[in-house]
Image (cartoon, rainbow, N blue to C red):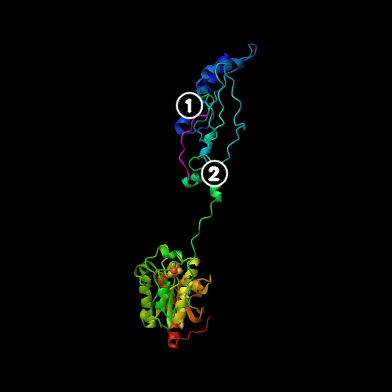
Amino acid sequence: MSADADRAELAELVRALQAHLAWERMCGAQVLPVDPAAVARAPSAAAPRAEARAPAPSSPPRSAPAPRAPEPARPPPRAAAPSFTPPPSAGQPSAPPPSPGPPSAPPPQRSVAHPQRPDVGPRRPDLGGQRPPLAPQPPSAPALVGAASAAPARPGQLSLGAWGALAAAPPPASAPPPPPVDFSAPADLEGLRALLGDCTRCGLCEKRDKLVFGVGDPAARLLIVGEAPGREEDRRGEPFVGESGQMLDRMLRNVLGFGREAVYIANVVKCRPPENRDPQPEEIARCRPVLHAQLRIIRPALVLVLGRVAFQALFDTSEGITRARGSWRTLRYPGGEARALVTFHPAYLLREPDAKRLVFEDLMAMARALADGGEAPPPT
Ligand code: SF4
């Protein structure tokens, strides 16, 4: 009775083991290192082992234990993170000793195969104890594997030789810095524009359509500074020609009494930031010498600073625009200085029409400064 129960348990284990091996063949995995040939012979081996484990007749009967099923659905461990793991040495114990079989049957081979080492596959009794030929593995990182002397690795893994080649390889060359340009040399705006050329001094050059240098009277007493070109400006190569530009034109003509041809208009950066984002500090810093050169050449008496980005970039400050709006500042640049009035950007007025009243007050202050011969009030 008890021997029958043991026999049934062993038969159940063998069936589960065969199902597991079928699963391994199906998904190409090897999790349970057992020789399939030995398993195929296992049913005949179960009986003597069960008999060997049968209790003595005097032992009390025991109930049949519940069969222990393997977990074929559990994912194989090596499918987790493909990282290099040193293979076990040949003498490293990796599995418990095999269970004894009948004398006529060879004991099941416990494989020491490592999932990442195809050169340590299981020995095959039917091949005289030799390891079977290995299926070719697809190369990973051909350049590295080609430089390696070790066996090819599985996809996503590097062999020992490849890791060595990677460590010995020189670091990738970084992008060369832009050649130095002396923006203080040109004496006029045409010369400055020619020197700027198709500028690639910052990453904004990659997405721009046209570089928006500036427009207006080179001898203007008033210089207007915005932050960056928008979509329409990028398309036409001229600053403030979109909706914001139309708003600026109305501000100039209705309050100051002249059009854009009487002033000079430029931006802090000359190329459009993608998706109209704010220009980054690095981009502003790369482009600042160009604006400084424009200021040095035009030498305006007054500057109208439009919006937070232009204000913070020109004065290198984190002060907010709401607090700074309406204030006069001294704008210093290499070779000169000017009085600057800070106000909101026309684009802000399109979103917040109530702010027009504040900008109107600022423009009236600018009109008075211009009427006084270009002299602005002392900085506040
Ligand atoms: S934003 Fe200024 S520095 Fe950057 S690429 Fe354009 S012109 Fe050159």
Disc 2 + disc 1, Cβ < 8 Å: no
Magenta-colored stretch includes residue 136? yes
Dot 2, crowdedness within 10 Å: few (<14), some or many (≥20)?
some
Q: Residue furthest bottom?
A: 372
Kindly tell me whether mark 2's CB lies below 8 Å from ligand 1: no
Task: Give the magenta range.
Answer: 131-140
Which amino acid type is marked by label 1? Ala
| Residue position marked by numbered label 1 in the rendering | 19
Label 2 vs label 1: CA separation? 38 Å
Q: 12 or 299, which lies in front?
A: 299
How far across and how far down the image is residue 316, in percent? 53, 72
> Residue at 36% of width from left, 70% of height from top?
237
Q: Earlier in the sequence, mark 2 or mark 1?
A: 1
Instruction: Please tell me in which quadrant of the rendered image residue 230 appears.
Output: bottom left
How far across and how far down the image is residue 97, in percent? 61, 26
Q: Residue furthest top?
A: 57
Q: Residue furthest left?
A: 236
| Residue position marked by numbered label 2 in the rendering | 161
Magenta-colored stretch includes residue 185? no
How far across and how far down the image is residue 149, in percent? 53, 42
91 with respect to 312 (left or right)? right
> Residue at 44% of width from left, 66% of height from top?
200
> Which circle, 2 or 1, is nearer the viewer?
2
**Residue 293 in the image: above or below residue 98:** below
Q: Characterize the magenta stretch by its predominant secondary structure.
A: loop
Q: 356 or 37, which lies in front?
A: 37
Q: Quadrant of ligand 1?
A: bottom left
Which amino acid type is marked by label 2? Gly
**Residue 28 in the image: above or below residue 269:** above
